Structures are given as structure tokens and as C-alpha cells.
Image (tube, rainbow, N blue to C red):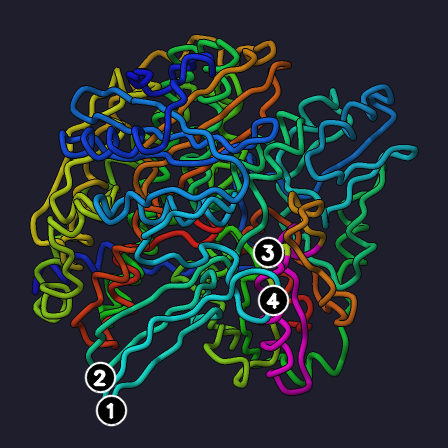
């Protein structure tokens, strides 16, 4: 059977998705991946009395997505794809946890969000990998961490200072978001819920959500709204990247960087607030467009802020990256090789820092990014230096993108009304959040109501990157490695 | 070397000199002025559109503890609801956060925080806080972190976030309290020695916010433990947090 071929944000009838035997699906996945495809979604849905597994593969070079499905009855199992293609590892574990369909032969079948010890007797408890040997010790950090940060548990197997293995247990922030997306029907509630999937990625997740709904609702937003959304997401990207450079500087005791980048971040998020009233972009984007326009006064404000920011960010970054004490900590720390990054499926700046040239704005253009093409920037070393430096490069790139976008005409109507959603359809909505590739998949029932809403935050791909990056590094470098990724706990835990 | 000096000079002095007089932009959604008489027919629309159920009618009122300041009610209220940029919203009493039609900001402000002499005596010059994110989305957490940055610098008041509950005078809770974090939250609170205070930051912590009907949260911790200070917002602006703390400490 041939897979259903679509593009990002193109909805299709569910009936168009071929439902095949899992063994065929498995073989075809392996073949398509060997030819250059990549898994971007792999999730289940209840359908009457069976469980349907949907698989979405991306061909980034051709900007195409391929969909296929397989059907299981309760308690069935399947042959795990992970031993052949490692990037399926977490998807299969999640599918098992959500639907009970076991991937036989999975090398690391453990809970994803529900294995917290002592919380519930019923759920499978998390068992950590144990390293044997003389003088070997285990260090457990979390869930509560030293700083003001979300919780997660990190279990290190160490010998002296050196980390041999890090295992990350998440799920502490699980709030039941996917269930709320289906149970609640108010579009405004769902819009606000998408703002809270990861509170530092408001524009990223909300944009992905509204575009999925606009596709299913056949709403074409205005060009001005598209340009404003581009400005919104790039402001978010710049603001967070500056904050990350501030935090990473702090971790190597480079206090000048910590102070300066923190002050620069304030300027950027206050610009977002000047447009929409919220430093994080709440209420900026809505279904059908945006809630706020950019008049001449705001446009001048934004342009002035950017002009100054460009100079300040450049100076601050040049000073940071030429400081010997900083380089001594950054370089060769927390290396993730290109090969490893490709095998496990890293995305976003962390992936690009290891040479993985993926960027949804470029590979599967959406919204205004067809008008404002984005050049993919990669580095080679895959260490903390690369993950920090790439943020600097992306800040400068995003400044240029916003400079172009503000010149766009803002005369069109900001918000278009829509009707209901097309029934019995599926749409895959992908976008490039500041952490990387966000993928939402939405399925409607026969009355046009959402019946399944599957969310993949880029952290879902990248947490394994943190675990692999710290191997063979000193445990005192763990905070630095972790901050160089800066992944979401709540976006992962949902 | 010279670039470093240049950078230092350009950075200049970033601390907001007088936080008590700091202003936020007009666009900021802070205290809501509600006047039902302007448009009584809009009350039902407002209450129905609110994503967290913060709006009740007969009479029209907004619960700032549930409000996420999204602005949707303002849009359909035809003038009956107007969010001002007054960011000082913290309260030491839960029911003060319920704003009825006709309540003036000054009335709210003067009643919001009860200053206790013991609190001023114990913590007025040094307050160390342990932050626990119990299912927070990272919005509140980032704004609490921003309160310690070079612009807001709450360290100047002796207020700091500490790494261990054993070093803390109080706990700052964000998030609706997910089931998976409920035990850890409870342990952290128990580990803080008396006297201690509890601060709930953000709509999720105060009322569950958007997640109040989720079956993955467990707020029973708050049935046993009294909250001393409520900071509304989604997320609250750093100034909201700072002013509430300064008021509470009697500074």
C-alpha cells in the first residue's frame, strides 16, 4: 500500500490513510527512513473497539509528509522498530503507556510520564539503570532542583567525577493536556490551553495550534496577520535565546554575560508586551489571525529596539565567545556527535549545533515563512560552545527576519472569522519553535469536533540528547550541559 | 579587554532605581475596572467566554485568583470590563481577589494586604524563599527568575531564592499541583522549619487555573496548608510579585 502524501498543514480525509498490517508498516518505515525520511509523529487513537496507530514520516528535502496507519486490538503487541531505527524509541514507549500496545524487543521499555515512585500503586514504577563495580556511586537530582526551574529527576551513574550514564525520569509536570483538548470544546479555552503547553513557548505552540484549526476550518488568514505572526515568533526566539545566553554565562561564572544578556532579554519581551500586553505573547495570536496590529508608531519602536539590540547583542556575544575562561568551559564539553544526533533524531538548535540541518521554517514552510525564507545554520562540534554560539547566530538571523517583516503592509484585516471544522479529517501542523520542531496532529470526528489532539514538543526528541551529551563529562558540568539544551519539562510531560 | 569595557559602559546601570514607582506599559492587563451598568446584556457573554470560569454574574464579578488576564471578556464586554495597567494585585486574603462591579482600584489596593507585625519583624530585612514548580508551565517560573535579574533585583531587599528548603523561610508555589509533584511539594514544605510562609504565584497555584478540571492534579496540599500571600497573573509580572512581597513585609 502506498502511504498518503501530504504537506505541512494540508488536511486530508481519514479514509485516505492506508491501514496496513503492522509488519508491512514496520518494513516500509525502515525502508523510507533509510532513504532519508524521519519520524515526526507516532501516536494512537481509540476507534470504536480497536486502537489505530498513526505514523507520520517527513521527507525534509521534498517538504513532504507521509501518513499510514495500523490497527490493533486491546493488549496486542508489535515488533519494535527501535532496534533498527533508534529515533522511534520514545514514541513506542509513549504509545505503550497511553494504549497498552507493547513494542516487543524494545531495548528500554520504561514509563514516559507515569512512573513516579510512590505516587500510584497501579502504574509501572520507574526502575533506573544500575551500574555495578567498586567505588561506583549514584547521584540523584530532583525532582525539585536548586534554581527556579521545572522539576525532573536525573539519575547519574558515576565513578569519581566522571558520569558514565545519565537517566532522566520525567512526568512530574503532567497535567493531562491532551485529554483536556478533547474533553473541552470551547475554542477560546483550547487557544489558552495551547498557550500553556509550555509557558516559555507561547507563540510556538499557539501558532501551531491555530494553524491546524485554520486548516481544518478552511480559514485563510490575511497577509498582514501572517507577517505579524512571523514577528511574534521571532521575538519569542530572540527573547529566549538571550535569556539562555544569560543563564549559560551564569553557569560558567561569567557574570558580565549573565547581567548583560538578561538586560537585553528584558528589552525584547517588553517589545512583545508593547504589541499585545503580555511579555510572553499571551493573547497575541488567535484563531483566524492576530489580536493586535502594528501601526506606524509601534513599527518605529520595534525598528529602533532592533537597531540597538543588533549592536548590543553582537558586542556582548563577541566578548563572551572570546573570553578564555568561558571557552575553557564551553569547548569540548557535552559533545553530541553528528552520528548520534542523527540516530536519535535531535531537532532544533541543539541538533543544528551537531550538524543536523533541520529547520521547519525552511523544510516545511508555513505561514509567513514562505515569504521570509530562512537559511539553515549549522555548526559542527556539537559541544556546549556550539549550542551556545548557534543561539547568537540565530538571534542575529531573527533580527533580520523581523526587520523584513515589519516592512510588510499591515493594512489587511487582522482576524478572519471561521465556521466549523471539516469532519473526519486529519491534519499535521509543524512549526519551528525556539527549541525546535513542534508537531501537532489533529483528528476530527463526524461532527467536526476534535477527537484526538497529539502534541509533540521538540523536547520529546531532545531529552535523550542531554543524557548522551553528559557521558564522560564531569558531573559538575551537568548544569552547563543541561542549560545548553534548555528543554521543556512541561512541554514534554503535557 | 577594551571590548569588555565598552560592553560594560553600554550596559550601564540597569537596576530600576525605585521599584515602588516603576511603571508598566498601557497595554499591560492588570486590575480590571468593572461597570456592569455600561452594558448589562454583555455579562452572560463575558461569563461564557472566560476560559477559567473566573467570571460570575448576578452580580458581575471577576475572581483574580482564577483570571488569566487573557482579555477575551474585555473584547465582548462592550466597555463593561476594562483592564487597567495597575500591576499591584497581590493579596493576603483569598476573597479580596474577587472584584465586583464598581470596585475602585484604590479600594482594592488598601484592603489587599494585611501587614502583620511579626512578619515584618521576622522577615522584613531578610526573606529566603524556596520555589517549587508543581506542574507550572514555566511562565511563572521565568517571571520569578526575572525578579532576580539586574533590572528588578529583589536581592536588594534581602529577598532571595535558595537551593534548599532547609535554608528557606517560605515556599513559593507555581503550577496547579500535578499528582506527580504533590508528594515532593509536601516534602519540601515539611522540610522548611518554622516560622514559614506560603506564597501562591499565578492562577494555576491559586485556583488550578486552566487545569482546575484536569484529573491529573491533586490540590489536597492546600486543604491542609494555609496560604499567606496570593499573587494573581498568568504569569504575574515581576513587579506584581515584588510589590506584593514588599507590602506583605511591611516595607
Q: Residue at x 87, y 22 (%)?
A: B40
Residue A437 in sight: yes
Q: In the image, is A187 to the left or to the right of A375?
A: right
What is the chain identity of the residue bearing mark 3? B
Report which residue position mark 1 lands on.
A135
* Residue under disc 4 on the same chain as residue under disc 2: yes
Tell me which numbered mark, 4 or 1, is placed earlier along the sequence. 4
Query: Label 2: chain?
Result: A
Q: Is B202 covered by the magenta stretch?
A: yes
Q: Percent position (x, y) of residue A260?
A: 28, 57
**Which x, y percent locates residue B9?**
21, 59
* Residue span colored magenta: B177-206
Indicate the quadrant containing the N terminus of chain A: top left, top right, bottom left or bottom right. Answer: top left
Task: Check contact, mark 1 vs mark 2: CB within 8 A.
Answer: yes
Residue under numbered circle 3: B175
Q: Position of residue A342 (x, y in %)?
A: 17, 45
Q: Is residue B186 magenta?
A: yes
- Dot 4 corresponds to which residue? A119
Distance between the alpha carbons at the discs numbered 3 and 2? 36 Å
**Picture layout, residue B126 above or below residue A170:** below
The reply to whether the C-beta atoms of the residues labelled 4 and 2 are less than 8 Å apart is no
Q: Which chain letter matches label 1?
A: A
Of labels 4 and 2, earlier in sequence is 4
Q: Secondary structure at mark 4?
A: loop
Q: Of A221 and B241, which appears nearest the observer?
A: A221
- What residue is disc 2 on? A159
Amino acid at each position: 500500500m502506498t502511504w498518503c502524501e501530504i504537506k505541512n498543514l494540508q488536511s486530508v480525509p481519514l479514509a485516505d490513510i492506508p491501514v496496513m498490517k503492522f509488519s508491512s508498516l514496520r518494513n516500509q518505515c525502515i525502508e523510507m527512513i533509510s532513504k532519508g525520511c524521519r519520524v515526526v509523529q507516532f501516536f494512537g487513537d481509540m476507534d470504536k473497539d480497536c486502537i489505530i496507530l498513526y505514523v507520520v514520516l517527513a521527507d525534509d528535502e521534498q517538504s513532504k509528509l507521509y501518513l499510514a496507519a495500523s490497527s490493533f486490538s486491546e493488549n496486542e503487541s508489535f515488533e519494535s522498530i527501535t532496534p533498527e531505527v533508534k529515533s522511534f524509541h520514545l514514541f513506542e514507549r509513549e504509545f505503550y503507556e497511553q494504549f497498552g500496545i507493547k513494542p516487543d524487543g524494545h531495548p528500554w521499555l520504561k514509563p514516559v510520564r507515569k512512573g513516579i515512585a510512590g505516587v500510584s500503586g497501579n502504574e509501572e514504577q520507574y526502575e533506573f539503570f544500575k551500574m555495578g563495580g567498586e567505588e561506583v556511586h549514584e547521584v540523584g537530582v530532583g525532582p525539585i532542583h536548586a534554581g527556579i526551574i521545572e522539576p525532573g529527576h536525573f539519575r547519574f551513574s558515576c565513578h569519581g567525577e566522571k558520569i558514565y550514564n545519565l537517566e532522566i525520569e520525567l512526568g512530574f509536570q503532567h497535567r493531562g493536556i491532551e485529554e483536556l483538548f478533547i474533553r473541552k470544546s470551547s475554542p477560546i479555552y483550547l487557544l489558552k490551553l495551547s498557550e500553556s503547553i509550555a509557558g516559555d513557548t507561547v507563540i510556538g505552540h499557539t501558532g501551531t495550534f491555530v494553524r491546524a484549526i485554520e486548516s481544518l476550518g478552511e480559514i485563510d488568514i490575511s497577509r498582514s496577520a501572517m507577517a505579524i505572526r512571523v514577528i511574534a515568533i521571532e521575538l519569542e526566539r530572540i527573547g529566549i535565546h538571550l535569556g539562555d545566553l544569560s543563564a549559560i554565562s551564569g553557569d560558567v561564572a561569567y557574570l558580565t554575560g549573565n547581567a548583560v544578556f538578561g538586560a537585553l532579554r528584558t528589552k525584547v519581551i517588553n517589545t512583545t508586551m508593547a504589541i499585545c500586553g503580555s511579555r510572553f505573547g499571551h493573547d497575541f495570536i488567535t484563531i483566524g489571525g492576530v489580536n493586535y496590529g502594528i501601526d506606524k508608531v509601534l513599527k518605529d519602536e520595534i525598528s529602533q529596539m532592533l537597531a540597538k539590540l543588533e549592536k548590543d547583542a553582537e558586542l556582548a556575544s563577541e566578548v563572551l565567545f572570546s573570553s578564555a575562561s568561558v571557552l575553557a568551559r564551553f569547548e569540548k564539553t557535552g559533545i553530541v556527535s553528528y552520528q548520534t544526533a542523527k540516530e536519535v533524531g535531535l531537532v532544533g538548535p541543539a541538533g543544528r549545533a551537531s550538524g543536523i540541518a533541520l529547520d521547519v521554517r525552511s523544510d516545511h514552510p508555513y505561514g509567513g515563512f514562505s515569504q521570509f525564507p530562512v537559511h539553515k545554520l549549522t555548526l559542527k562540534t556539537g559541544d556546549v560552545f556550539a549550542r551556545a554560539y548557534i543561539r547568537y547566530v540565530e538571534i542575529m538571523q531573527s533580527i533580520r527576519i523581523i526587520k523584513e517583516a515589519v516592512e510588510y503592509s499591515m493594512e489587511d484585516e487582522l482576524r478572519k472569522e471561521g465556521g466549523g471544522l471539516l469532519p473526519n479529517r486529519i491534519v499535521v501542523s509543524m512549526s519551528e519553535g525556539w527549541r525546535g520542531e513542534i508537531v501537532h496532529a489533529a483528528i476530527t470526528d463526524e461532527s467536526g469536533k476534535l477527537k484526538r489532539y497529539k502534541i509533540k514538543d521538540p523536547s520529546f526528541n531532545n531529552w535523550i540528547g542531554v543524557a548522551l551529551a553528559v557521558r564522560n563529562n564531569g558531573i559538575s558540568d551537568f548544569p552547563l550541559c543541561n542549560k545548553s539544551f534548555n528543554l521543556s519539562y512541561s512541554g514534554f510531560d503535557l | 579587554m577594551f571590548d569588555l569595557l565598552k560592553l560594560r559602559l553600554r550596559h550601564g546601570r540597569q537596576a530600576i532605581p525605585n521599584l515602588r514607582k516603576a511603571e508598566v506599559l498601557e497595554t499591560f492587563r492588570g486590575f480590571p475596572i468593572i461597570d456592569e451598568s455600561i452594558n448589562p446584556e454583555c455579562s452572560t457573554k463575558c461569563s461564557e467566554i472566560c476560559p477559567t470560569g473566573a467570571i460570575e454574574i448576578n452580580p458581575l464579578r471577576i475572581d483574580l485568583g482564577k483570571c488569566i488576564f487573557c482579555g477575551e471578556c474585555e473584547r465582548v464586554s462592550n466597555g463593561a470590563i476594562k483592564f487597567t495597567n495597575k500591576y499591584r494585585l497581590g493579596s493576603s486574603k483569598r476573597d479580596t481577589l474577587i472584584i465586583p462591579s464598581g470596585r475602585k482600584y484604590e479600594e482594592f489596593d488598601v484592603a489587599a494586604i494585611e501587614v502583620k507585625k511579626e512578619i515584618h519583624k521576622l522577615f522584613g530585612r531578610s526573606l529566603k524563599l524556596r520555589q517549587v514548580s508543581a506542574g507550572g508551565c514555566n511562565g511563572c517560573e521565568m517571571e520569578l527568575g526575572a525578579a532576580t535579574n539586574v533590572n528588578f533585583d529583589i536581592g536588594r531587599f534581602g529577598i532571595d531564592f535558595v537551593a534548599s528548603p532547609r535554608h528557606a523561610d517560605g515556599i513559593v508555589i507555581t503550577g496547579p499541583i500535578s499528582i506527580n509533584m504533590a508528594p515532593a511539594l509536601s516534602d519540601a514544605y515539611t522540610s522548611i522549619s518554622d516560622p514559614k510562609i506560603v506564597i501562591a504565584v499565578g492562577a494555576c497555584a491559586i485556583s488550578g487555573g486552566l487545569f482546575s478540571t484536569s484529573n491529573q492534579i491533586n490540590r489536597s496540599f492546600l486543604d491542609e496548608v494555609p496560604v499567606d500571600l496570593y499573587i494573581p497573573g498568568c504569569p504575574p509580572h515581576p513587579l506584581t510579585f515584588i510589590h506584593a512581597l514588599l507590602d506583605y513585609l511591611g516595607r
